[in-house]
């Protein structure tokens, strides 16, 4: 196996091509940056990038992520394509964890799974990115400080909703946030 890797590196070097690792299909380990090319994730999430934010419906939800007891930032500019200067109805602007829902259509439902899909980070009942349950590690979702029993990807985003995703060894003293103080204009 090592010989095969050395041979591939040598051949790539001879051919003048840079050697790069292939990206992980689960998003890898935190912190998770916004994707370099957001278009595949946007398409996979069933979203569409538009030149302007939608005005039919406008609200915000908040996402906290904890890994092994430490906060992990939510990436800035998820759902934003700087190359085409477009953005989806579901996006972030900064690393505060505020999810912007600025829809072109009133009543459209958006899920946490759509956000994670456009982010390029796998989210299931037992996995966030490359982090999986087992070996003394658990994964739990909370909405408004209460346990969410199903698949966290199915959480429907709502105005001023607080979502917390917690991965790591069980910690009975950990209390997930029950709310987030949004600025007055959000």
Image (spheres, helix red, strand yellow):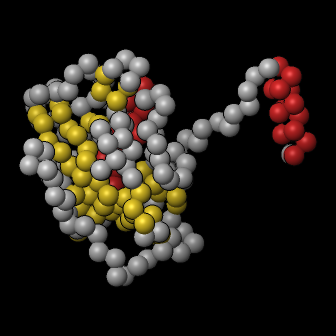
Rendered position, 26 above or below 69: above
Q: Nearer the viewer, residue 181 or 7?
A: 181
Q: Position of residue 53 (x, y in %)?
A: 20, 27
| Residue 13 appears in the rendering | yes
Q: Which residue appears at 15% of the width and 53% of the height? A: 182
Q: Which residue appears at 39% of the width and 62% of the height? A: 71
Tell whether 80 sits left or right of 24: left
Tally of numbered tags: 0
Q: Residue 119 lies in what quarter of the image?
A: top left
Q: Residue 65 lies in what quarter of the image?
A: bottom left
Tell which residue pokes out farthest to the bottom in this image.
173
Dividing the image into 4 quarters, which one contains the C terminus? top left
Q: Which residue appears at 45% of the width and 64% of the height? A: 67
Q: Position of residue 122 (x, y in %)?
A: 46, 47
Dividing the image into 4 quarters, which one contains the N terminus? top right
Rendered position, 89 above or below 5: above
Q: Position of residue 179 (x, y in %)?
A: 18, 62
Q: Which residue appears at 33% of the width and 20% of the height? A: 85
Q: Position of residue 118 (x, y in %)?
A: 39, 36
Tell which residue pokes out farthest to the right in this image.
3
């Amino acid at each position: 196996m090592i010989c095969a890797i050395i041979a591939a590196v040598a051949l790539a070097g001879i051919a003048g091509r840079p050697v790069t690792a292939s990206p992980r299909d689960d998003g890898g380990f935190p912190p998770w940056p916004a994707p370099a090319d957001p278009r595949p994730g946007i398409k996979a999430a069933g979203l569409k990038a538009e030149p302007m934010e939608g005005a039919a419906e406008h609200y915000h939800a908040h996402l906290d992520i904890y890994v092994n007891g430490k906060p992990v930032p939510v990436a800035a500019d998820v759902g934003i394509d700087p190359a085409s200067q477009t953005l989806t109805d579901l996006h972030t602007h900064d690393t505060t964890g505020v999810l912007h829902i600025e829809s072109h259509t009133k009543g459209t439902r958006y899920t946490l799974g759509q956000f994670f899909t456009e982010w390029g980070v796998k989210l299931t009942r037992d996995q966030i990115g490359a982090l999986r349950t087992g070996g003394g590690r658990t994964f739990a979702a909370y909405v408004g400080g209460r346990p969410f029993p199903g698949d966290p990807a199915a959480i429907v985003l709502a105005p001023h909703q607080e979502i917390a995703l917690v991965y790591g060894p069980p910690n009975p003293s950990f209390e997930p946030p029950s709310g987030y103080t949004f600025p007055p204009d959000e």
